[in-house]
Image (tube, grey):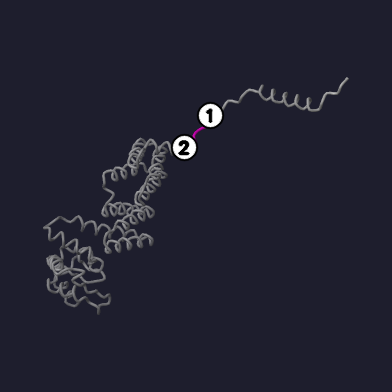
C-alpha cells in the first residue's frame, strides 16, 4: 500500500479547520450604553448654541432635574467663548452640585435678559454672596467685576474688596458695595450733575474722600468753596500724610474741573450721611 503524502494530510487538516470555523454561529453584537462623552455630545447637538444650552439648563433646573441641568450646563461650557461666560457656567455648575436650582434659574434668566453684563449688576451679585458669607461665590463675582471694570478707580475698589473677602471681612465688603451702589443709584439731577458724579468716580476721588465725600484717608470735602477745590486739584497736597497728587489739564480739563468742583461744593453734610455739627466740620476743613 502506498503511503499518503504529508502534503495531502496537511491540506486535509487545514480544510477541516476552516469548515469547523465556518460552522460556528456568528455572535450577535451587544448593545452598549452611550458613554458620558457621547451623552455630552448629544446634549450639545440638541442645544445648538450657548444661549440655547442655557435655556435648556434653566428649564431642567426649573423642573427640578439636577442631572439634566448639569448636562446642559456642561454643553454650554463646551460652547462658551469668553472667560466671563465660562466663569458664569462654572458658578452655576457649583450651584447645581449644591442643589441651588432656583439660583441657577435666576442667574440664567438674568444673563439671557442682558442683565449680567454690567459692572453694577456683578457687584450686586457679590453683595448678596457677601451677605451670605459665601466666600467662593463672592470672589467669583468680584473677579468678573474686576475684568469688566473700565477705570483704574473701579479696579482699585474691586481689588480692595477682594482683599477684604480673603481676610474674611464680609461686613466691610457689604458696607463698601452698598455705599457704591447707593451712590450710583442716587436720583438723577441735571446732565451736568450726572457728569460730575461720573468724574468723581473716574478720577478716583472716592478712594480718599469717601463715596459720599464723608472723608476716608482724606478729609470731608462736601461743601468746600469752588475755588478751594480747584486749587487743591491743580496743586495737590504733597505735604499731607497721604499726599494728594496734582491733576494736570491733560488729566482733567478746566471745563470738567469746574463741573466737578461746583458739584462737590453744592453737597451738604446731609449728603455725606454723617452727623457732624457744621462748625466742627468747618474747622476740620480749615485745619486740613
Checking the image for residue 91, the label placed there is none
Position of residue 261 measured from the top left corner of the image (x, y, whole percent): 14, 68
| Sequence-first disc among 1 and 2 | 1
The relative height of residue 45 versus residue 89 in the rendered view (above or below) is: above
For label 2, the crowd category at 10 Å Cα-Cα, with few meaning under 14, some 14 to 19 and many 20 or more, is few
- The local secondary structure at tag 1 comes to loop
For label 1, the crowd category at 10 Å Cα-Cα, with few meaning under 14, some 14 to 19 and many 20 or more, is few
Position of residue 226 measured from the top left corner of the image (x, y, whole percent): 12, 71
Q: CA distance from mark 1 to mark 2?
A: 15 Å
Kindly give the residue lying farthest to the top in the view shown: 1
Q: Nearer the viewer, residue 3 or 236?
A: 3
Position of residue 194 measured from the top left corner of the image (x, y, whole percent): 15, 59
Q: Nearer the viewer, residue 44 or 258?
A: 44
Q: How many marks?
A: 2
Residue at coordinates 41% horizontally, 39% vertically from top-left?
71
Horizontally, is 172 left or right of 215 in the view?
A: right
Position of residue 197 measured from the top left corner of the image (x, y, whole percent): 18, 61
Q: Nearer the viewer, residue 191 or 221?
A: 191
**For the residues bearing labels 1 and 2, Cβ distance under 8 angstroms:** no
Residue that label 1 marks = 31
Name the main secondary structure of what is drawn in magenta. loop
Quarter of the image with the N terminus is top right
Find the magenta span and give its range.
Answer: 31-35
Location of residue 74 by image quarter: top left
Q: Is residue 111 magenta?
A: no
Location of residue 8 by image quarter: top right
Residue that label 2 marks = 38
Quarter of the image with the C terminus is bottom left
The relative height of residue 69 versus residue 31 in the rendered view (above or below) is: below
The relative height of residue 143 versus residue 205 in the rendered view (above or below) is: above
Amino acid at each position: 500500500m502506498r503511503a499518503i503524502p504529508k502534503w495531502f494530510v496537511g491540506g486535509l487538516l487545514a480544510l477541516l479547520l476552516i469548515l469547523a470555523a465556518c460552522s460556528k454561529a456568528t455572535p450577535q453584537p451587544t448593545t452598549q450604553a452611550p458613554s458620558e462623552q457621547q451623552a455630552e455630545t448629544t446634549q450639545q447637538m440638541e442645544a445648538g448654541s450657548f444661549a440655547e444650552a442655557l435655556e435648556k439648563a434653566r428649564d431642567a433646573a426649573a423642573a427640578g432635574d439636577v442631572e439634566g441641568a448639569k448636562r446642559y450646563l456642561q454643553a454650554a461650557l463646551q460652547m462658551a467663548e469668553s472667560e466671563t461666560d465660562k466663569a458664569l457656567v462654572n458658578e452655576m455648575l457649583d450651584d447645581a452640585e449644591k442643589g441651588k436650582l432656583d439660583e441657577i434659574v435666576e442667574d440664567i434668566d438674568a444673563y439671557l435678559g442682558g442683565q449680567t453684563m454690567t459692572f453694577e449688576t456683578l457687584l450686586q451679585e457679590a453683595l448678596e454672596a457677601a451677605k451670605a458669607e459665601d466666600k467662593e461665590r463672592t470672589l467669583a463675582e468680584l473677579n468678573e467685576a474686576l475684568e469688566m471694570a473700565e477705570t483704574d478707580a473701579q479696579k482699585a475698589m474691586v481689588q480692595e474688596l477682594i482683599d477684604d473677602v480673603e481676610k474674611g471681612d464680609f461686613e466691610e465688603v457689604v458696607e463698601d458695595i452698598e455705599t457704591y451702589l447707593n451712590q450710583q443709584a442716587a436720583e438723577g439731577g441735571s446732565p451736568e450733575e450726572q457728569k460730575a458724579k461720573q468724574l468723581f468716580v473716574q478720577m478716583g476721588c472716592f478712594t480718599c474722600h469717601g463715596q459720599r465725600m464723608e472723608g476716608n484717608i482724606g478729609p470731608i470735602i462736601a461743601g468746600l468753596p469752588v475755588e478751594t477745590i480747584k486749587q487743591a486739584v491743580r496743586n495737590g497736597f504733597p505735604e499731607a500724610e497721604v499726599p494728594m497728587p496734582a491733576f494736570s489739564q491733560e488729566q482733567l480739563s478746566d471745563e470738567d474741573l469746574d463741573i466737578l468742583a461746583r458739584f462737590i461744593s453744592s453737597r451738604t453734610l446731609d449728603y455725606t450721611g454723617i452727623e457732624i455739627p457744621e462748625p466742627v466740620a468747618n474747622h476740620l476743613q480749615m485745619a486740613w
